[in-house]
């Protein structure tokens, strides 16, 4: 209670109906990422002998990292790897090395730039009918022409995009 009474009470105030629209400006970030890493650290508590005080609180224990697990998540089965588990000396150094290794491997995969697969009849018809970018909604123009946006890993066609969105 003494710590709680230091702060004023709080109340959640929700936006009104006219101001509850979610705005999203970075359209290139709305697409799913092909890879991400899920990591979990394990640690144990080591008692601190000094009993340091920080902001009125006594430091009692310190977390000591003892290991980690890292799992690469992707929709591409051929690039999926089993979880990597490390429990030994210097786990943070090994974690950093593993992250750098994953980064290099994922960069190599992503920059491979698979050629686009041929369009199906339905995709070709959709592309021919498109007059505006499926990403930003702007009309195609001479300066910002229509392109075939595709996955650079699988080669699958995704949608008609303007050149600016496709380059982003």
Image (tube, rainbow, N blue to C red):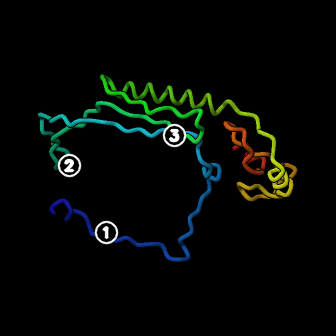
Q: Secondary structure at mark 3?
A: strand
Is 145 displayed left or right of 82 in the figure? right
Give coordinates of residue 75: x percent, y percent: 58, 42
Give coordinates of residue 106: x percent, y percent: 57, 31
Task: Give the position of the N terminus as an image quadrant.
Answer: bottom left
Residue assigned mark 2 = 55
Q: Secondary structure at mark 1?
A: loop
Residue at the extreme bottom: 17
**Which of 94/74 is in front?**
74
Is 98 displayed left or right of 168 in the figure? left
Is 23 displayed left or right of 101 in the figure? right
How far is disc 3 from disc 2 in space, using C-alphas?
40 Å
- The circle on residue 79 is none
Give coordinates of residue 117: x percent, y percent: 77, 39
Among numbered discs 2 and 1, the one appearing first in the sequence: 1
How far is disc 2 from disc 1 in space, using C-alphas?
22 Å
Give coordinates of residue 79: x percent, y percent: 57, 33
- The circle on residue 10 is 1
Residue assigned mark 3 = 73
Q: Is there a contact, CB below 8 Å, between mark 3 and mark 2?
A: no
């Amino acid at each position: 209670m003494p710590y709680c009474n230091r702060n004023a009470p709080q109340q959640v105030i929700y936006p009104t109906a006219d101001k509850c629209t979610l705005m999203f400006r970075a359209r290139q970030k709305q697409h799913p990422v092909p890879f991400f890493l899920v990591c979990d650290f394990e640690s144990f508590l080591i008692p601190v002998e000094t009993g340091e005080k920080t902001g009125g609180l006594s430091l009692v224990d310190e977390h000591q990292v003892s290991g980690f697990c890292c799992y690469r998540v992707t929709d591409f089965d051929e690039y999926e790897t089993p979880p990597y588990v490390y429990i030994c000396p210097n786990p943070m150094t090994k974690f950093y090395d593993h992250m750098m290794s994953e980064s290099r491997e994922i960069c190599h995969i992503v920059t491979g730039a698979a050629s686009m697969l041929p369009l199906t009849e339905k995709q070709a018809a959709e592309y021919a009918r498109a007059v505006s970018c499926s990403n930003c909604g702007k009309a195609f123009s001479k300066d910002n022409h229509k392109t075939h946006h595709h996955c650079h890993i699988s080669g699958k066609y995704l949608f008609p995009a303007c050149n600016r969105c496709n380059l982003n």
